[in-house]
Amino acid sequence: MNKSKKGLILASGIIALVECFFMFILGLVFCLNASVIVDSLRFEVTADIAVLTNMIIAMGIVMFLLAIVNLVGGILLLCSVSGDKIKQRKGMFITGAVFTIIGSGAVGVSAILLYIAFALNDDSKPEVVPAPSVQPQPKVEDGNEKIKNKLEILREMKQKGEITEQEFHDMVLDLLKK
């Protein structure tokens, strides 16, 4: 993993923890001050006060849950890049990234840094080079096939009477010596 990618993951983990803190505060504000928020909206919204109060409390609870998910994701990200055995912690990195992206709502700063980190190439992976196209090679005769072909030619010459038995025998011996 190159230094840029490691730095982005580290920054994403730290920012996820900061986002988590603010999400906890926001969830706390929603849950504890639901009636105050409803009173401030009463002039603009004509809905039942109890329904609005329950919706705001539910939003506060959702913020708490997302904060917890973001907290776990940030911790996993920080643990995945600490030390020398980063390759062995790839599952921890992926899990932390997923938790952080979900916890930050997929558009938080920590999620955006992770998207950039995913786009960077690792130094440890070789670039994929396309295989060269394979051209059919002309058939090359090996030594045994050449000798066989020459012996066939000599036999034909002997049968046609072009060479004598003694000449055939001498030529075969010369051929085998090579």
Image (cartoon, rainbow, N blue to C red):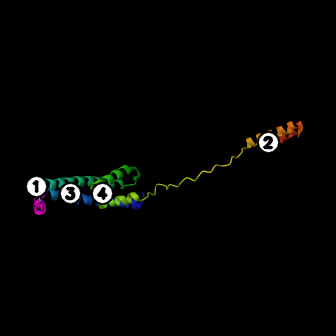
Badge 4 marks a residue whose secondary structure is: loop
Q: Give the residues drawn in magenta, as a range.
A: 32-45
Badge 1 marks a residue whose secondary structure is: loop
Amino acid on which the number 3 mark rests in the picture: Phe
User: What distance separates the C-alpha of mark 3 from that of mark 1?
Assistant: 27 Å
Q: Residue at x 76, y 39 (%)?
A: 148
The answer to whether mark 4 and mark 2 are in CB contact below 8 A is no
Question: Mark 3 or 2, which is nearer the eye?
Answer: 2
Frontmost residue, 32 versus 89:
32
Q: Residue at x 40, y 49 (%)?
A: 88
Frontmost residue, 101 versus 9:
101
Tag of residue 106: 4
Amino acid on which the number 1 mark rests in the picture: Asp
Instruction: Give the residue number, with chain letter if any, for mark 3.
Output: 24
Q: Residues within 10 Å of mark 3 (few under 14, many from 20)?
A: many
User: What distance separates the C-alpha of mark 4 from that of mark 1?
Assistant: 32 Å
Q: Is residue 83 magenta?
A: no
Amino acid on which the number 2 mark rests in the picture: Lys
Question: Mark 3 or 1, which is nearer the eye?
Answer: 1
Mark with earlier residue (1, 2): 1
Instruction: Give the residue number, with chain letter if any, for mark 1.
Output: 48
User: What distance separates the C-alpha of mark 1 from that of mark 2?
Assistant: 105 Å
Judged left or right of residue 39, residue 91 is right
Q: Residues within 10 Å of mark 4 (few under 14, many from 20)?
A: some
User: What distance separates the C-alpha of mark 4 from that of mark 3?
Assistant: 17 Å
Instruction: Give the residue number, with chain letter if any, for mark 2.
Output: 150
Badge 2 marks a residue whose secondary structure is: helix
Question: Mark 4 or 1, which is nearer the eye?
Answer: 1
User: What distance separates the C-alpha of mark 3 from that of mark 2?
Assistant: 91 Å
